[in-house]
Amino acid sequence: MVKHGFDLDGVLGTSLIEMYSKCGSIECALAVFRAIDRKKLGHWTAIIVGLGMHGMADQVLELFLEMRKNGMHPHDILCRAGCLDEAKNVIESMHMKPNKVIWMSLLGGARNHGNVEVGDYAARHLIDVSPDTVGCYVLLSNMYAAADKWEKVSQVREMMRKRGVKKDPGCSSIEHRGVLHEFIVGEKSHPRTKDIYSKLTEMREKLKSVGHVPDTSQVLLCLEEEKEKEAELENHSERLAIAYGLINLEPGSPIRIIKNLRVCNDCHSVTKLLSSIYDREIIVRDNSRFHHFRNGSCSCKDFW
Ligand SMILES: [Zn+2]
Ligand SMILES: [Zn+2]
């Protein structure tokens, strides 16, 4: 097609991308996409949906960033502030059935912008296409919690219980001298617990001194007091592992952590800050990607 000089800039390009994605050749779809000189919204949407269909979440995010760099804003389905309803419309008008990645993105966007209505819509579809994904329920539940809709939070829990979906407790591990140390959220049984918690106190002070305000909007528990919510965040498993790493690893060596769940927003901003406060590279592999924290920023550019 490209060789024969067909004009891919218009609808033809979009249809080809869709066709190739649907018949399983995402490479061809990408080749068509790359060959288009003046990419329009339809082209971007088609390739992003195609990559989503093929479960290529990392490339989806890369393309979103590229799309934004190219000045494509309005219907960005990764959901910029205020565009969520448009995003919803774009998804509804797609020729292909949106998959888990697309709904997850919409839900994530809705959560970040506190749009409960769109979040609710996305979550219901997400649960339809992927009823066993714990992450969907957790995102939905967190979103309700942030909006103070505690009744809805318990409905989500009830739904999880009925369907036998279990939320694993957050767990992070770090290796030191050939031994794997595992920390569960709120852990107090590690032999170095005392040192770890005093390190956490030191971390809290340092974070405060650089102006960090804990983002308690995503604390899952129904805690009344702001102080309790902050304490809950502070005990997230990756922070215990980071504290352990700061105490025990050679100065200057990177701290590598593996976490079973998605890193929460507050831990993400805290880890960015810690990487510059302690001048340490911190690498966290959570259940969706690697985060390389260095000099106060993260390789995921806050998309995860
Ligand atoms: Zn956290
Ligand atoms: Zn990150």
Image (tube, grey):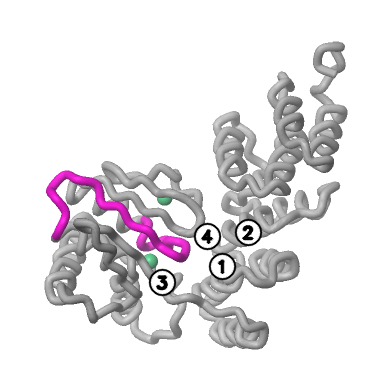
First in residue order: circle 3 vs circle 2: 2
- The disc at residue 170 is 3
Cβ–Cβ below 8 Å for labels 1 and 3?
no
Amino acid under label 4? Asn
Q: Where is residue 104 drawn, in percent x and y?
A: 63, 59
**Is residue 103 or residue 250 the one in the foreground?**
250
Cβ–Cβ below 8 Å for labels 3 and 2?
no
First in residue order: circle 4 vs circle 3: 4
Cβ–Cβ below 8 Å for labels 2 and 4?
no
First in residue order: circle 1 vs circle 2: 2
Label 3 element class: loop
Residue 71 in which image quadrant: top right
Residue at (82% x, 12% y) in the render: 3
**Is residue 206 or residue 53 the one in the foreground?**
53
First in residue order: circle 1 vs circle 3: 1
Kindly identify which residue carries mark 4.
112
Q: Distance between the residues labelled 1 and 2?
A: 9 Å
Residue density around tag 3, few if under 14, some if 14–19, many if 20 or more, within 10 Å: some
Amino acid under label 1? Gly
- The disc at residue 104 is 2
Cβ–Cβ below 8 Å for labels 1 and 2?
yes
Residue at (61% x, 49% y) in the render: 78
Kindly identify which residue carries mark 1.
135
